[in-house]
Amino acid sequence: MRVAGIDVTVDWSLLIIFLLIVWGLASGVFPQWHPSWPPMTAWLTAVAAAVLFFASVLAHELSHSLVARAYGIRVRRIMLYVFGGMAQIEHEPGRWVAELWIAIVGPLTSLAIGFLCLYLGVVGITRVDVTNVASVEHALVALGPGRTLLLWLGQINLVLAIFNLVPAFPLDGGRVLRAIMWGATHDLRRATRWASALGQAFAWLLIGAGIAMVLGFSMPILGGGLINGIWLAFIGWFLNNAALVSYRQLLTQEILQDVPVSRLMLTRFETVPPQLPLETLIDGYMARSDQRAYPVVGDDTRLLGIVFQRDVERLTQEQRRAMTAREAMRSPEQVVVARPGEDVLEVLNVLAQRDINQVPVLEDGRVVGLVRRADILHWLALQNAPKQTRA
Ligand SMILES: [Zn+2]
């Protein structure tokens, strides 16, 4: 699905949430508000409410994305999943003002949707004495499906805005806090460290409250109950991971920034001639080294193609016996290549996105080196960077 030129993907976990919302509303909330509604009305209103809820989550994420784009940051895609949504932007904003606006526009959008829905839900209703509980209850029972829908949607969007405004990185509120600290200290790393420490503290608070609820304690505001407790602890665990991962990513980014490919690339590697039998390449080269990609070069040292171990592994014994390096290679157009002056960070992103282990470095059509994921991680370890499983 594409909205405003941005890919939107829907995770399977969303279906579970969708069903939970529909079921909860149709069998719990709506019958309680409107005992007189026929079941069909309750179910249809519940389905419409769930659909509109995800539409408002999408609007929240879309607002982040559009502001990011206005600041010149490419938005890879928006993912809708179990906790709502996430806009994946290509890189972190370079200035604190951009970060601030990109972060705060999401909760502002949710607040606007929330208040608009609440307003539309009650506009035109007269003679409700808000100080009189009986009068309010009477007015609520008299509400039709449309107004009921708007009121539910309004309050859920306000909840969404408030949850996202909690100053715990990587929630929107945490990003706002980080942007402000970044602006005040001019030190992005320190700002991120503080914001993600707060994020982790908040996450552990949720986990603690969740466990207490599972054990039967009742929490202020949150209430109690086994399911609510498990749910809360799960959100806390997720937030804790997210805070750690974003901090590590930032450190990696900072260390690899402005490091050119030429500094990290492997320059001592084997190349093979095109007419070399594939069997010789396997027994004489691949079996004897940890090099997994072999540039095939002609007499003028120009790159003709690359033989990948991954491709060779798929060939049968007969194919291996019959083929030459030229027949087993991929042409340079089919292969991702890097340039010596390129940032290592960019190459690391490409390696992670395509799930490949190395790229050849080309200069004027000649292979001058190989950049391997393992070498980048090794180099990061030498710089005393925190370990990471995935860039
Ligand atoms: Zn947001």
Image: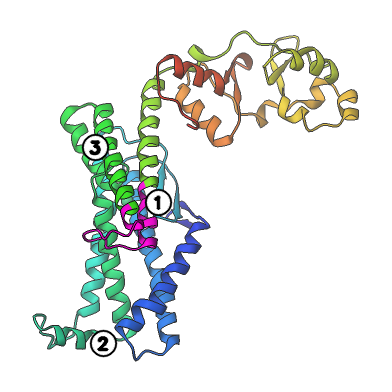
Query: What is the three-letter code of the residue carrying label 2?
Result: Val
Residue 162 pos. (x, y %): 24, 56
Judging from the image, what secondary structure is the residue with disc 3 in? Answer: helix
Above or below: residue 368 compared with residue 82 = above
Q: From the viewer's perspective, is 327 left or right of 51? A: right
Q: Earlier in the sequence, mark 3 or mark 1?
A: 3
Q: Are marks 1 and 2 in contact (CB under 8 Å)?
A: no
Residue 41 sits in quarter: bottom left
Foreground residue, 199 or 123?
199
Residue 363 sits in quarter: top right
Q: From the viewer's perspective, is 177 left or right of 68? A: left
The numbered dot on residue 234 is 1
Residue neighbourhood size for the residue with mark 2, other residues' Cα within 10 Å, grouped as few (<14), some (14–19), many (≥20): some
Residue 49 pos. (x, y %): 38, 73
Judging from the image, what secondary structure is the residue with disc 2 in? Answer: helix
**Residue at figure coordinates x 40%, y 48% from the top left:** 87
Above or below: residue 334 compared with residue 87 = above
Residue 226 pos. (x, y %): 38, 61
Judging from the image, what secondary structure is the residue with disc 1 in? Answer: helix
Q: Which residue is mark 2?
A: 141
Q: Which residues are magenta?
A: 212-236
**Residue at figure coordinates x 39%, y 58% from the top left:** 58
Residue neighbourhood size for the residue with mark 1, other residues' Cα within 10 Å, grouped as few (<14), some (14–19), many (≥20): some
Give the CA separation, mark 1 to mark 2.
35 Å
Q: Earlier in the sequence, mark 1 or mark 2?
A: 2
**Residue at figure coordinates x 40%, y 36% from the top left:** 245
Give the CA separation, mark 3 to mark 1.
24 Å
Q: Are marks 3 and 1 in contact (CB under 8 Å)?
A: no
Q: Which residue is mark 3?
A: 178
